[in-house]
Amino acid sequence: MSEGAALHLKGRVLVGPDEVRDELWVLGGRVTFERPNGVREVTTVGGWVLPGLVDAHCHVGLDAHGPVDAETSEKQALTDRDAGTLLIRDAGSPSDTRWIDDRADLPKIIRAGRHIARTRRYIRNYAHEIEPEDLVAYVAQEARRGDGWVKLVGDWIDRSTGDLSACWPRGAVEAAIAEAHRLGARVTAHCFAEETLAPLVEAGIDCIEHATGLTEETIPLFAERGVAIVPTLVNIATFPRLADGGAAKFPQWADHMRRLHARRYDTVRAAYDAGVPVYAGTDAGGSLPHGLVADEVAELMKAGLPAGAALSAATWGARDWLGRPGLTEGAPADLVVYETDPRADVRVLAAPRLVVLRGRVIG
């Protein structure tokens, strides 16, 4: 929009799960609920308005083989943006994507630095691969490089046993999480297996990615400590294919992955019912394409979350959790407009009518 122009959004503005307004304006790149005076040009658009969507587990600058160039990273970010994802928590990337911060046309990224994994216990070319005695130093390094988050690889296949197992001794994890917190960063961890979870939560971790190993024993611990999960159900859908590919060499691991997949919806619903915070993340940028946040919200509903909770996992609740504003007076105008009510059918999230980023109409 040109200087002195305003965008008027009229219809149903979903400010929060329980707050709906009739209209808002975008003026000077920011949200206002007060009718502006002295504006030369006003463009009015009708529809259902949500804060810009959030992908709370995404990897810009990464593909299945490792870091990618700036052109590929740009395409990834644009794909997310055009799907309505305007805020990304980048849950580990070996690429330097700080240049994206200077682009007003690309989503805002909250970085967790680079993955920190045990030696030969993660995907090649993704992570710092280290031993436990170096964990605190690397956590401190990535805490300083990131935007308030650090990402650990909590478990992975152990080739000596042929199954998933924890990567870190408890003492090393406790010291590393304490150091991250001292530096003002929160810690999350990739975790598939059951036995990995309790030691990490008891060590003070803030979030668990995937969390397929949650059980009736560990779910109350998560709820009591307020530890969030980002289930990445669109990624967990790939477990049977992964299991088929590795079954000949690691049959125990393959069987374990199939069992985790089979109970994935029950696991997420049980966590939600117990009061565990649940947020939407796609795990895009590894083997999955970008722009899938609408699919993840639909998966959360398949798991049994009510529509409002599934939407909140990618909008109001996620933004609050990440410390970023939604549709509040004076906030940056990052929003998405839909033809119909996304609360009635979350599938509408896949087809935004209008995307507004930093007050700029994208499409």
Image: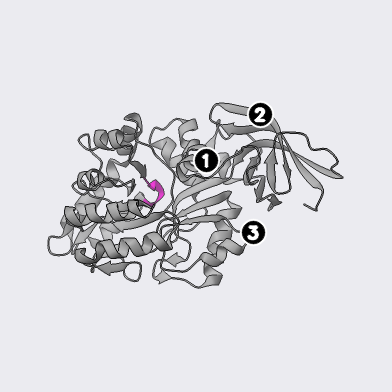
Tell me the distance, in whole angstroms, between the alpha carbons under discs 2 and 1: 16 Å
Residue under the image location 37 percent in, 55 percent down = 183
According to the picture, the residue beneath numbered tag 2 turns out to be 21
Q: Quadrant of residue 228?
A: top left
Residue 88 in percent (x, y) is at 50, 53
**Dominant SS type (magenta):** helix
Tell me the distance, in whole angstroms, between the alpha carbons under discs 2 and 3: 27 Å
Q: Which residues are magenta?
A: 231-235
Viewer-side label of 3, 1: 3
Tell me the distance, in whole angstroms, between the alpha carbons under discs 3 and 1: 20 Å
Assess disc 3: are there few (<14), some (14-19) or many (≥20) residues with their C-alpha within 10 Å of its C-alpha: few
Identify the mark at residue 104; answer none if there is no mark.
3
Q: Is residue 233 part of the magenta span, yes or no?
A: yes
Q: Give the mark nearest the N terminus, 2 or 3.
A: 2
The chosen color scheme is one colour
Tell me the amino acid under the disc marked 1: Thr
Identify the mark at residue 315; answer none if there is no mark.
1
Judge whether 104 appears above or below 192 on screen: below
Judge whether 232 appears above or below 151 on screen: above
Asked if residue 286 can be seen in this view, the reply is no
Tell me the amino acid under the disc marked 2: Arg
Instruction: Name the outermost residue toward the bottom.
Output: 69
Assess disc 2: are there few (<14), some (14-19) or many (≥20) residues with their C-alpha within 10 Å of its C-alpha: some
